[in-house]
Every structure is written in structure tokens, then in C-alpha cells.
């Protein structure tokens, strides 16, 4: 469908999937936001870390919605999100736990080194390690969704390589994640209500581009949908 009607349907479809994805992320990750808003994370950081495991399946659900819309023009956001959210616990759940455990260990080591007076030396390495973990996780989520024929270990290894090899896309994704995270931390209503899904859409698109050479031809956006 072309012309004004086609453009109107495209815009409303995009707005719908973004707003609905924002809502679904907020609902499925409700314990994370409650802890972030109501408790002192300096005291309850362990509980916050455990609750943040919910972010992994939520991202998988959001990525599935974006993929389904980009490839098929589908706006069944709730059903697509729910199906991917349930399925991702087995395949992507362990990856989410591993990434969060890695970041936790890095931050604890940074805190220990700070107590020993080595903060200025440890800070650059800590930033690099945490940033690398975040962008690798973003690429891994796309790989797990797109390449079901590959083992989880193979996807993770490929994602580490691709995140470094395509560092330009990784830097853009990292910048978007930082902005969305900072806005959500300071203004949860704005971050969760408006910015989460658009930001994640950019991250998904960048991460998918890093995988493009390893994706089957059927995974490319069709000409009709692209219009």
C-alpha cells in the first residue's frame, strides 16, 4: 500500500509496536524498577542484581517484536513478545546470568582496588570491560534469535568477534544504551514510557547489521516491507 494511507499505516504501526514494547518491558521487569525506585542500591545491590536477570528475556521479547515487524510488517506485539519471552529463558537466560555475573565481578574488583588507592588505574579497564560486556550481550541476543541452528556457545564466540570487528556499530549501540539507562534512572516514566523501545530498536538494528553477513538470505528485510 502506497501513498498517504500507506504512510499513515506505517507510522501508526511503528508507534504501536514501540509503545506496546515499552509497556511490556515495564511489566515484565517490574521488580527491577521497584527496587531501583524504592530501595538504596548501595545496600540492596545484590537483590537488584538478581532482579535484573529479568532484563534478558525482556530484551529477547523486544527484539522479536522488532524483527517480526521489520521482516513481515506484523504488529502482533503482545503475542510475539510473550512467545519470545517464554522461549528465551532456556536459550538466552544463562547468557544473561553470565553477563551480569561478569559485570558484578568487575565492579566488585573495581571497588576493592579503589579501597587500595588504585582507583585511577582501575577505572579505564573497568569501563572497557563493562562496555565490552554490554555490546557483546546486545549482539549475542540477536544471534540467539536469528541463528537457532547454532549452539549457544558458538553464538557467544561469534558475537565477541563481531562486536570488536564492527566496533563502529558497537560504539553507537553503547552510546544509546548509556543514554537510555541514564534517562531511565533519573526519570523512569520518561525512560520506560518513551525512550526504552526506540533506543532498543536502534541497538537491535546495529547488532543485526553486525550479524548480517552470517544471516540467511530469508532474514533480510523484504523490499515491500522496507517501503
Image (cartoon, rainbow, N blue to C red):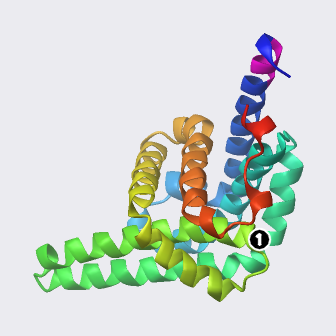
Q: Foreground residue, 159 or 194?
A: 159
Q: Dot 1 lies on which element? A: helix
Task: Say which quarter of the image contains residue 115.
Answer: bottom left
Number of disc labels: 1
Residue ID at (72%, 37%): 226
Q: What kind of secondary structure does the magenta stretch mostly adopt?
A: helix
Q: In the image, what residue occupies the spot 55% across and 84% down? A: 157
Q: Which residue is mark 1?
A: 88
Decide: is 218 above or below 125. above
Instruction: Judge from the rendering whether residue 32 lies leftward or rightward of residue 109; answer left or right.
Output: right
The residue nearer to you, when weighing 8 against 17, is 8
Residue bounds of the magenta highlight: 5-9
106 to the left or right of 58: left
Residue 6 forms part of the magenta stretch: yes
Residue 136 x %, y %: 50, 71
Q: Residue at x 76, y 26 (%)?
A: 10
- Residue 33 image position (x, y, % from top left): 58, 54
Amino acid at each position: 500500500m502506497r501513498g498517504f494511507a500507506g504512510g499513515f499505516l506505517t507510522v501508526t504501526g511503528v508507534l504501536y509496536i514501540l509503545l506496546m514494547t515499552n509497556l511490556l518491558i515495564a511489566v515484565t521487569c517490574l521488580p527491577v524498577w521497584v527496587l531501583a525506585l524504592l530501595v538504596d542500591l548501595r545496600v540492596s545491590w545484590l537483590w537488584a542484581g538478581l532482579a535484573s536477570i529479568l532484563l534478558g528475556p525482556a530484551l529477547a521479547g523486544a527484539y522479536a517484536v522488532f524483527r517480526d515487524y521489520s521482516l513481515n510488517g506484523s504488529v502482533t506485539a503482545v503475542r510475539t513478545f510473550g512467545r519470545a519471552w517464554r522461549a528465551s529463558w532456556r536459550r538466552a537466560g544463562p547468557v544473561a546470568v553470565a553477563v551480569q555475573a561478569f559485570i558484578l565481578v568487575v565492579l566488585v574488583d573495581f571497588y576493592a582496588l579503589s579501597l587500595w588507592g588504585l582507583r585511577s588505574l582501575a577505572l579505564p579497564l573497568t569501563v572497557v570491560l563493562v562496555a565490552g560486556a554490554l555490546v557483546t550481550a546486545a549482539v549475542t541476543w540477536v544471534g540467539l534469535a536469528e541463528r537457532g541452528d547454532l549452539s549457544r556457545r558458538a553464538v557467544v564466540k561469534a558475537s565477541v568477534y563481531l562486536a570488536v570487528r564492527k566496533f563502529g556499530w558497537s560504539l553507537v549501540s553503547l552510546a544509546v544504551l548509556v543514554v537510555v539507562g541514564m534517562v531511565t534512572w533519573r526519570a523512569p516514566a520518561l525512560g520506560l514510557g518513551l525512550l526504552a523501545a526506540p533506543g532498543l530498536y536502534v541497538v537491535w538494528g546495529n547488532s543485526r547489521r553486525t550479524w548480517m553477513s552470517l544471516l540467511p538470505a530469508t532474514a533480510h528485510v523484504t523490499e515491500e516491507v522496507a517501503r
